[in-house]
Amino acid sequence: MMKIRKYILMAPMLFASSLGSMAGDGVKVEHLSVNNTLVRVEGDARYLMMPVEEAIADARVNLLVDGKLDRTFFVRLAKSKVDYSVPFDLSPYKGHNVVLEIFSNNEYSPLGEVKEQACWDALTLGDSFDATNTEKYRPAFHHTPLYGWMNDPNGMFYKDGEWHLYYQWNPYGSKWQNMTWGHSSSPDLIHWNHHPAAIEPDGIGTIFSGSSAVDTENSAGFGKDEVVALFTSAGTSQMQSLAHSSDNGKTFTKYPGNPVFTLESEARDPNMFWNPETKEWNIVLAHALDKEILFLTSPDLKEWTLQSAFGKGIGAQDGVWECPDLFPLEINGKKKWVLLVNLNPGGPFGGSATQYFIGDFDGKKFTADTDASGKIPTKWMDYGKDHYATVTWSDAPDSRRTAIGWMSNWEYANEVPTMQFRSANTLPRDLSLFEGADGQIYLASTPSPETLKLRDKTIVKGKSINAGKKGSSIALPSANDGICEVAFDIEAKNNAKVLVTLSNKLNEKVVITYNPADNTIAFNRTQAGISDFSHDFPAVTVSPTFTEGGKTSVNMFIDRSSIEMFAKDGRYAMTNLVFPNEPYSSISFSSEGNAKISNLEIYSLNAN
Ligand code: FRU
């Protein structure tokens, strides 16, 4: 898969005896005023199904357990129609009295009275819910949440043969809200198992982005090889908190002294690593509105010392700085440090994107390399519109530095045409460094080697095509509703542009243009399919190829609603969403002059 399994095995729905209310059996609804309703859960079941209408405002829900406020969350409880239902897990409250006190927001509702709303009839109890992979835009081999909204990947670590991936999750709807760490794990970065929420909101706040690592030194005192996590508690202000896990990241215990670190201004997304040289933790933290990264150290993740800051006035500055990561990589036997800084908005094609800096780090301070003119250049990790919040795994095996990003853009992430789930992560990518023609060091991203396992049938192998004005077209595999991998080399003659077009019978198309005159490759999705959900969606994104002499290469992964394009050696990466009404069924190659396409390979992919 991404194998979407039913969350629990479908079991017969267990209903308690009827209580004669409007809602499902075992659920009693009492309307108190125009916007206030009490829902009493009187039946015995695993889940309360909450009906959602996407287009309306959130209702605020106070969860009262045995008469005490347990927590508050937000759900778009349906008013006119039910788009889908989300499960609220009642199992932690078994044997207790559960009441939901609901405050409806009537702002966007034509309904005057809360009692007329569609949700009340559809509040039901059940022991299972169906999260089968039914939506046509649900990727087949990218990580997605089983249901609900997802943004940033968080807290990734590798331990005992498993890659753990947490993510910013809304368990109660497919728009951003109720930030919780969702959890998936995988033996191979491709087939993901889904687990219950790992870290849930508390009195300090919702759980924003952060990082995890294995505490091999027992530095925090929770035990040797305990998994430790740092995250931002988002209440009225943003604070940094600590949690730890003794069951390999399934469940976390929050540190009672939280928050462990506060600042007077917005700071978030702590990312840590144990520094064996200094025998302490290094932590990078986004000083979001100040558009800089703070460097902190800690012997035990509880006491923090602010060491330095990097970034004021440097790099792309047209948005807030978020989700940093700092790690070493080698080039020509020399260690260099990579500082990833995600930025929103202010990306090269609007909205969110990942910039990075190459430099040196002495355990306290990061110093960025400069270019020939003495300036610190802005470098982009991916030249598509849908690559954000990218960070890397801690403790990856074989000295690998493996990254994953959120495959969307804050400009329209909440509006893309999916419903049961919203957003996928990029393919995992292994990172390395290379030297560009300008003498600068750049970051290369290649799909992690595990993606090779996806290859199913070889449709084309080793083919060469002379691409001229007329163009030649090849059918794409139709199996699995438009998922495939395509790779080829391009050699352009006399600086003539080369066009590669993916299209379907509806004449929806993606046009990729290699321009050897300026060594760029462009991705045009203006006619790719559905785009009316946001005027920011239609776009042409352009990347330098980091090659010269009229040659470049493409390795492309198509997964229903996304296309990731890499140079074969990873010198450029470009990630874009597309929403064709039908899968693209052919690829064609043409050139304004003459061009040679060689080593063409097309594979159908199988993620099962
Ligand atoms: C980035 C971000 C983070 C924050 C999280 C909240 O997309 O804004 O800075 O922690 O999302 O969900």
Image: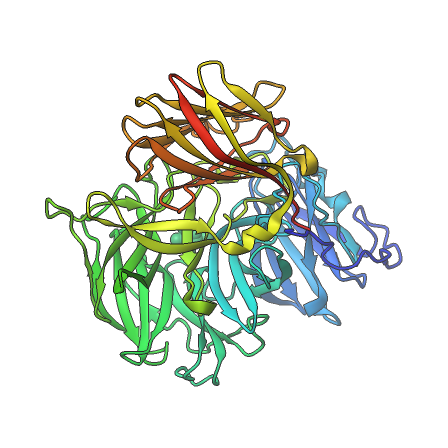
Question: Residue at position x 52%, y 49% from top?
Answer: 425
- Residue 107 seen in this snapshot: no
* 515 sits left or right of 113 in the view: left
Relative to 132, residue 302 above or below: below
* 564 sits left or right of 302 in the view: right
Q: How is the image coloured?
A: rainbow
Going by the picture, which residue comes out furthest to the right? 17
- Residue 277 seen in this snapshot: yes
Going by the picture, which residue comes out furthest to the top? 470
Q: Position of residue 274 (x, y in %)?
A: 36, 74
Q: Position of residue 564 (x, y in %)?
A: 48, 40
Question: Residue at position x 50%, y 68% from top?
Answer: 158
Front one among 105 and 213: 213
The image quarter containing residue 99 is bottom right
Numbered disc total: 0
Question: Residue at position x 86%, y 59% from top?
Answer: 16
Going by the picture, which residue comes out furthest to the left? 373
Q: Position of residue 441 (x, y in %)?
A: 25, 51
Relative to 201, residue 275 above or below: below
Q: Position of residue 33 (x, y in %)?
A: 64, 46
* 47 sits left or right of 217 in the view: right
Question: Residue at position x 85%, y 58% from top?
Answer: 14
Front one among 94 and 433: 433
Front one among 248 and 75: 248
